Image (cartoon, rainbow, N blue to C red):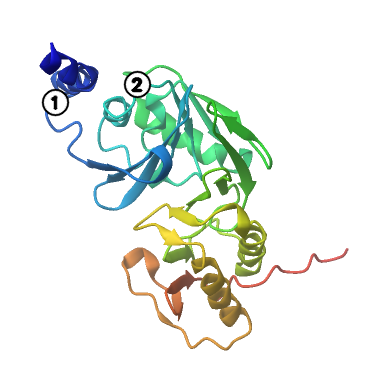
Amino acid sequence: MKSLSFFCPIVPAVLMLFMCNCLFGQDSFSAYTSTKSVSNVWTIVESNTVNIYVVEGSDSALVIDAGYGKGDLKGYIQTLTMLPLIMVNTHGHGDHTGDDHQFEKVYAHPEDMEQIEAIIKRTAGDKDGKTTLVPITEGYVFDLGGRKLEVIEVPGHTHGSICLIDAQNKILFAGDHINAVVWLFLKGCYPLEVYLNSLEKIEKRINDYNIIMPGHNALLDKTFITEHIACVKSILDGTCVPVPYNYSAMTKGAMLCKYKTSEVAYDPENLFVQPTKKN
């Protein structure tokens, strides 16, 4: 009986893994690796590139972002937790919304909903049910049961970017608003000046988090935000000596500024908000 009681807790996860591999093929989970890190948070990394977080409360689990869509994300998460799942997008880019179509309901900021809806229509095909998009704005709170995450609007990387603060557990889930290298040269990015305002807004809440969990790469200490703000300011005041950001063909024309551990890739033609012309 002792050995049976040892194995019983892992049976649901093993069974789910077996069933999903039968239904979707042996490679349905191959894109994912996962670790359980701070305060009942699973960090799932897809294709060694993008982070997906599963935050467990007592009643439900919040899934933060949906990756590229290269596997059975929902099935994989169900091998990690048996809690009901709530999906939220930090922004509308395809590397964070690729498996939205696997979920019946997806929470996102209204400014990025058009882009998210287009991705869902493209990826769902005829095999999945309809996904409902639910708008969330500043101050919305996800109550997971004994655990609450607050939505903070942070326009910059996209118009509808958000962060989520878990103040009780001192965690900031930052999406692509804060990464070791932030991309601000893409079509649809706000001017760098707007991004700075969003960073400073998050800095004002610095007592509510100790750890930053970004959309890409390893977690960051909260002190990173000070360096990141300094990097952005050095671009805006002209003290940074930038270099071309030759990451790939899509980064042509972008420049890169570095300050300590922070790197910002930006469009030199999109620094300041242009004044509104009067008639």
The relative height of residue 194 versus residue 229 in the rendered view (above or below) is above
To which residue does mark 1 refer?
Answer: 25
Farthest-out residue, front: 2
Residue at point 35%, 31% (across, down)? 123
Q: Earlier in the sequence, mark 1 or mark 2?
A: 1
Q: Which amino acid, mark 1?
A: Gly
* Label 2: how many Cα within 10 Å (few below 14, some 14–19, many 20+): few
Residue 36 is left or right of residue 265, and the answer is left
Of circles 1 and 2, the one toward us is 2
Q: State the CA–CA distance, disc 1 to disc 2.
A: 22 Å
Residue 254 visible from this viewpoint: no
Residue 79 visible from this viewpoint: yes
The relative height of residue 271 versus residue 137 in the rendered view (above or below) is below
Give the image location of residue 179, x and y in percent: 44, 61
Q: Between residue 175 and residue 124, name the one nearer to us.
A: 175
Residue at point 53%, 28% (across, down)? 144
Give the image location of residue 276, x and y in percent: 79, 64
Q: Which amino acid, mark 2?
A: Met
Q: Secondary structure at mark 2?
A: loop
Q: Quarter-wise, where is residue 104 in the image?
A: top left
To which residue does mark 2 refer?
Answer: 82
The relative height of residue 82 versus residue 163 in the rendered view (above or below) is above
* Label 1: how many Cα within 10 Å (few below 14, some 14–19, many 20+): few
Give the image location of residue 63, x and y in percent: 43, 34
- Which quadrant of the figure contains the C terminus? bottom right
Residue at point 32%, 66% (across, down)? 249
Farthest-out residue, right: 279
| Total numbered badges shown on the rendered structure | 2
Give the image location of residue 212, x and y in percent: 47, 56
- Which quadrant of the figure contains the N terminus? top left
Q: Secondary structure at mark 1?
A: loop
Q: Quarter-wise, where is residue 16 in the image?
A: top left
